[in-house]
Each structure stands twice: as structure tokens, then as C-alpha cells.
Image: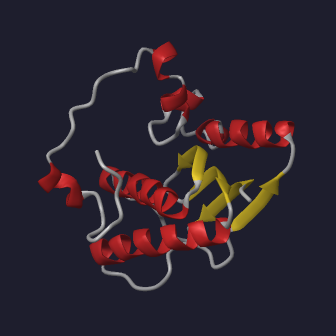
Amino acid sequence: MRNTYHICLSAGNELLFRSDDDYVRGFNCLALTAYETDTVILADSLMSNHMHICVRAEDPARFLSKFRISYSRYFNSKYCRRGRLGESSPFIMELSGFYHVLTAICYVLRNPLHHSIASSPFGYKHSSANTYFRNELGKFYNQIKMPAKSYYRFLPKNVLCPEG
């Protein structure tokens, strides 16, 4: 049975994301891990040194472990480092009840504001707040699909990926 969780992964003394390509790869690793583990991502906010996500999952530890393995491989290869990325024991809290879930999602969406990185939750491009409210913000646009041969610039090799 799927439950709802708030997950926070901190980098400790490092950075999780150093460039826009890192954020793109991080989002793609999250999406592919969610697809592989049948997890639903309700909200996300990826910051340079930590990330918050709210998910509906059967096993949030497995979801996070698979994400960390795939993203760490990319990150370690790109920046010539070794080892696990992030703290050894991430924060995972099961959410119970509508208001608990709503509060956690609001916290995740407002995280860039909380850390004074943006003047509003919509001013930070690496958060799902912009996706939720893109029509209201006038940010709805048709994205050009990239050719299939370009996928692996942003995706790990031999990845289970849905059509399209």
C-alpha cells in the first residue's frame, strides 16, 4: 500500500547540483526512478545543497536509494569523485492526514523562499511550483521534443523509460 512521505536529502559539506545540466539530470533521475518504482512525485524542490520531495510510495527508502545510485554515478563520473552522494541517513517522514500532506507540500514548494534564494516560490526554476501554476503564471508553452539520439545526454544508459 502506498503512503505519502516527505523526503529530504542533504549533501552535507558538498553540493548536489553544480550546474543546470546537473539539475536536468537530477530531475530525470527522479522521474525515471519514480517510473521504475511506481512512485508518484507530488512536489519537489531541488536546491544546490539539498532537495525536498513529497512522494506517494510503497517503499520510500528503496525509491531514494535507486535515485541516489543513478544520480551519484553521473555526478561521480562528471566531477571525478567517489562514494555516496549526500548524507548517510536522509530525512524520511510518513505524512498522515490531509492537512499534514498539504502542509508538507506547501513547505516543499516554498523551500526556495525559505532559504532566501527567490523572492517568491515561482522565482526558482528548479521547483514544481512553476509546473503547478504555469497557466496562471503565463509560463505554459509547447516544448520541442528532442530527438531520440539526444536523450542520453540527460539520461543514464540502459534505463527503463516510458514511450515518448
Figure quadrant of residue 3 = bottom right
The image's colouring method is secondary structure
Residue at x 47% of width, y 16% of height: 135
Quarter of the figure with the N terminus:
bottom right
Residue at x 45% of width, y 53% of height: 31
63 horizontally vs 90: left or right: left
Front residue (pair 73, 66): 66
Front residue (pair 123, 128): 128
Quarter of the figure with the C terminus:
top left
Q: Is residue 53 visible?
A: yes
124 horizontally vs 119: left or right: left
51 horizontally vs 100: left or right: left
Residue at x 47% of width, y 63% of height: 36
Horizontal and vertical percent position of residue 50: 57, 58
Horizontal and vertical percent position of residue 63: 58, 66
Horizontal and vertical percent position of residue 6: 71, 54
Horizontal and vertical percent position of residue 117: 54, 40
Q: Is residue 12 visible?
A: no
Front residue (pair 46, 37): 37
Front residue (pair 86, 164): 164
Residue at x 67% of width, y 40% of height: 114
> In the displayed structure, would residue 61 be above or below residue 162?
below
